Image (cartoon, grey):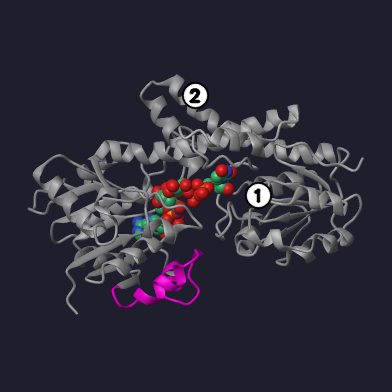
Amino acid sequence: MTFGKTILCIGAGYVGGPTMAMIAAKCPHCRVTVVDINPERIAAWNSDDLPIYEPGLDELVRTTRNRNLFFSTDIERGIRENDIIFVSVNTPTKSFGLGAGMAADLQYWEKTARQILEFSKSSKIVIEKSTLPVKTALAMERILNCRDNGICFDVLSNPEFLAEGTAVRDLEHPDRILIGSRDTDSGLKARQTLVDIYANWVPRQRIITSGIWSSELSKLVSNAFLAQRISSINAISALCEKTEADVTEVSRAIGMDTRIGPKFLNASIGFGGSCFKKDILNLVYLCRYYGLEEVAHYWENVVKINDYQQERFIRNMMGAMFNTLAGKGICLWGFAFKANTGDTRESPAIFIARRLLEERAEVVISDPKALKNARSDLSGVEGRVRYVEDPVAAAEGCHAIALLTEWHLYHELDFQKIFESMAQPAFIFDGRNILDHKRCFDIGFNVYPVGKPPLRHF
Ligand code: NAD
Ligand code: UGA
């Protein structure tokens, strides 16, 4: 079969895999290849056991794979044979040298740029899909256009806004697609090529274009604003706990103001995930780089409040359980950073589990999708940890349950049976405010939600 457009994506992770599967599904006339340096990841994409869990992803991959979607480790061939290249490699926080702990680590991204330069035999459009500091496209252009051999590269910024757990839905019905380009003839032509790809399924008014630096910055700012809302409501949850106000009632009251809106106002144990923290720190680093100390400080506090919220959760547990957790069984319901994903990157559960182990608690971890990652996150950590998939069995004999991920299955359990199987007095710390607190209290639990008065039997 002859394909109209040939597309490559470098990086077969949480973004590269699902995004390319959606493009392949919606553009049957395009051939889409996804490459990665990690052969195990590629083998998993080519198997029935995909490397990531996302509702709807298995079916999407099953219908497109080996039709017009291909997964491969042959990066050189991929670059040679494709005209449109998405770069979706990881851009973690730098852990060494200048900017350690703040700046983005651009080594994977730069290696990719050099590979594109080395293996290209024709002109190409290169699209930044990874989240990057502002002006990274300039560096990409400089690397790519350093040879005077008639091969030209147009660099576009096309940040991804999908959220894990809803990736397939977000990709199929995005709020917007953002494409940043240079305002030159060839930049605008490249931009149009990408607009045409998305226009196969995204309404034209939802595809917005901008300058390339605005596009790069919008991605960081979007994550910073989302995280800021969570830190704002979490900060208020601390005040609610002191004043007997109820944070859910406050969220509802403020969220009905259409200028504020109701979303992303759920108080919790804090935000996790691979991106919010790293992208805010990246923004903070950029502000400092440009001498904007006050602006840097403002955004840095979003991360500080998030750390504070996690530590507060542990302190509340300690306070409620007579100031000692040593030798007590604590069952964690949920380890993923949010529901409907097996991803545990930056999950608050990692911090909470470590802190509980420091306090010499005996931790039992339960999660329907994330136990494999949980084991690896806690490998080498001292202390007594068990992993039990069934949440009811996991809670047996424990003194407390800490609900850390809002998996729907936790609504449907037999709480009477769970209560009777636990050490008394039994506690529930609902880090997501999803349980029926009154019902749990009536059964006999001492219930500690986030940002609401506790329901205690003593
Ligand atoms: P990931 O770690 O899951 O995947 C990145 C992949 O790139 C890995 O499989 C890695 O092996 C591969 N890779 C690294 N260097 C390579 C190279 N030189 N050649 C080929 N492959 C290489 O990361 P992710 O979660 O998919 O995130 C990718 C980017 O997208 C990041 O910048 C992230 O900030 C951004 N982003 C992520 C999400 C999300 O929900 N995870 C959402 C929006 C944006
Ligand atoms: C987030 C953004 O929502 C995406 O738009 C963005 O593309 C992505 O980051 C990225 O750049 O990686 P994601 O981290 O997958 O997506 O998931 P979110 O739904 O944003 O949740 C992030 C964290 O905030 C989770 O730990 C979640 O439990 C927590 N959260 C969310 C709250 O504590 N309260 C809320 O009200 C909402």
Question: Quick one: label 2, few (<14), some, or many (20+) residues within 10 Å?
Answer: few
| Image mark for residue 297 | 2
Instruction: Estimate the x, y position of residue 96 in percent, counting from the top left.
Output: 48, 40
Say whether residue 81 is visible: yes
Image-based side of 367 in relation to 258, left or right: right
Q: Earlier in the sequence, mark 2 or mark 1?
A: 2
User: Is-magenta flag for residue 55?
Assistant: yes
Instruction: Estimate the x, y position of residue 108 in percent, counting from the top left.
Output: 37, 51
- Comparing 129 with 236, the one in front is 236
Instruction: Estimate the x, y position of residue 317 in percent, counting from the top left.
Output: 79, 41
Q: Where is residue 397, by image quadrant? A: bottom right
Q: With respect to residue 50, does 305 lie above or below?
A: above
Residue shown at 54% from the left, 28% from the top: 301
Say whether residue 91 is visible: no
Image-based side of 341 in relation to 405, left or right: left
Image-based side of 369 in relation to 30, left or right: right
Instruction: Estimate the x, y position of residue 181 in percent, counting from the top left.
Output: 21, 43
- Comparing 358 with 129, the one in front is 129
Residues drawn in magenta: 41-68
Q: Which residue is mark 1?
A: 349
Mark 2: which secondary structure? helix
Q: Quadrant of ligand 1?
A: bottom left
Q: Label 2 sits on what residue type?
A: His
Query: Is the C terminus in the top left, top right, bottom left or bottom right quadrant?
Result: top right
Query: Is the N terminus in the top left, top right, bottom left or bottom right quadrant?
Result: bottom left
User: Is-magenta flag for residue 416?
Assistant: no
Q: Label 1 sits on what residue type?
A: Ala
Q: How many marks?
A: 2
In the picture as drawn, the residue positioned furthest to the left comes out as: 150
Mark 1: which secondary structure? helix
| Image mark for residue 221 | none
